[in-house]
Image: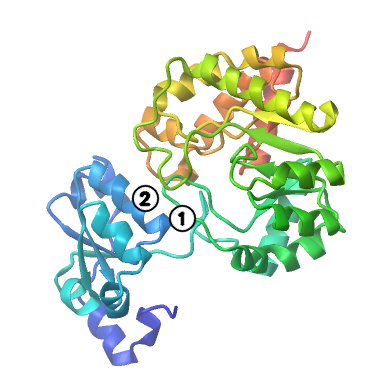
Amino acid sequence: MANYFNTLSLGQKLEQLSKCRFMETSEFHGGVNALKGKKIVIIGCGAQGLNQGLNMRDSGLDISYALRDEAIKTQRQSFKNASSNGFVVGNYNDLIPTADLVLNLTPDSFSDGGKFNKKDKAIQQAINLFNSGANLIDIGGESTRPGSKPVNEKLEWSRINKILKLLSKKIPISLDTRKSNIMKKGIQLGVKLINDVSGLEYDPETANVLKLNNTPFVLQHSQGRPEDMQNNPSYKNELLDIYDFFEKKLKFLRSIGINHNKIIIDPGIGFGKNLKHNMNLIKNISIFHSLGFPILVGNSRKRFIKDISKNNDSKLRIGGTVASSIYMMTQGVQILRVHDVNEIMQGIKVYKEIIKN
């Protein structure tokens, strides 16, 4: 999809820019109050657009969605995303001229907004992270953030195959996927680890693929699927419920002949959990050591940090990521899945120096 602004003539661009003004940082000292009472229109309603809108509406803002005529007429997924969540939906001509603020959101990603969704940029970013101290680089072609929709196998593979071919020869790669055929292809290219956020529940063939290839993998807990997992998640006792999930799943995996030393467990922070669940899991993360497997935790830039700090910008959640990472390291967590490698490594080095005898 072409950028809307770039389709305009120079005269039209100047006309529209003359109606805009840049907002000062100081205007946001009171949070989003500067935007209250304004009409905010988001162009497009994919996974990222929907979650941005939900977060902004939760903050008391007036949100609506502008979609192409065809998307509205045929009730495509973007239309269903917006309308099923109670948002006003209209075409560009109906909504944009009356908007006080227009957001044009780019392809989906949990934290970078599509910043590294081009091959060359993705490869350079992976190398930068590895050089900063990461032991393994996790690559995926399907967003599984809350509210995201599944993508088909062909599209998922097209997003990552060239990157995997180039990077797997240079640095250790973990492949983030729920699909058995994607796993097969990635393993053939030299992927060192499979990270399945569904806990091998999404595709019934994944366990067999991992067994046949004797490939290490992350077994993650997730309540529900990305589309609905944050719709009022509930547990009798989140610690015991997730512990029971691992016990049952591990028993099954052993029964089909998967090697014990190929499994890493991940309690799934933010995957079907609210703030209380996440805090209880982090605080008591050491309980999972009794299962006898390495523990991986993906705490980086997660929503629990936003809920505590009230900072909605994922890129400004590094402090919360460092704090929770160091705490879990002291509880024996062996693997941390993070975005900001340099900052986390720096925090850990300083902490270790402080406690050194």
312 horizontally vs 247: left or right: left
* Distance Cα–Cα, label 1 vs label 2: 12 Å
Q: Nearer the viewer, mark 1 or mark 2?
A: 1
Q: Are there few (<14), some (14-19), or many (20+) residues within 10 Å of tag 1?
A: some
Q: Nearer the viewer, residue 252 or 95?
A: 252
Residue 127 visible in the displayed image: yes
Q: Residue furthest front?
A: 255
Q: Residue at x 36, y 79 (%)?
A: 4
Instruction: Give the residue type that dot 2 points to.
Output: Asn
Apparent side of residue 233 relative to residue 165 in the rendered image (left or right): left
Residue displayed at 70% across by 34% down = 345
User: What is the x, y in percent for residue 213?
Assistant: 86, 46
Residue 201, image quadrant: top right
Task: Tell me: 91 left or right of 9.
Answer: left
Kind of residue indicated by mark 1: Lys
First of labels 1, 2 by sequence position: 2
In the displayed structure, 97 sits above or below 41; it is: below
Residue at 32 percent across and 50 percent down: it is 25
Q: How many marks?
A: 2
What residue occupies the far top of the structure in this picture?
A: 357
Residue 103 image label:
none
Q: Position of residue 350 (x, y in %)?
A: 69, 24
Of residue 22 and residue 69, the one placed in the foreground of this image is 69
The residue located at (78%, 55%) in the rendering is 184
Residue on which the image places disc 1: 149
Question: Which residue is label 2 attached to?
Answer: 51
Determine whether, in the image, residue 275 is placed left or right of residue 73.
right
The quarter in which the N terminus is drawn is bottom left
Please tell me which residue lies in front, 32 or 224. Answer: 224
Q: Provide residue 163's location: percent of width, then percent of height.
A: 73, 64
Secondary structure beneath dot 1 equals: loop
Q: Secondary structure at mark 2?
A: helix
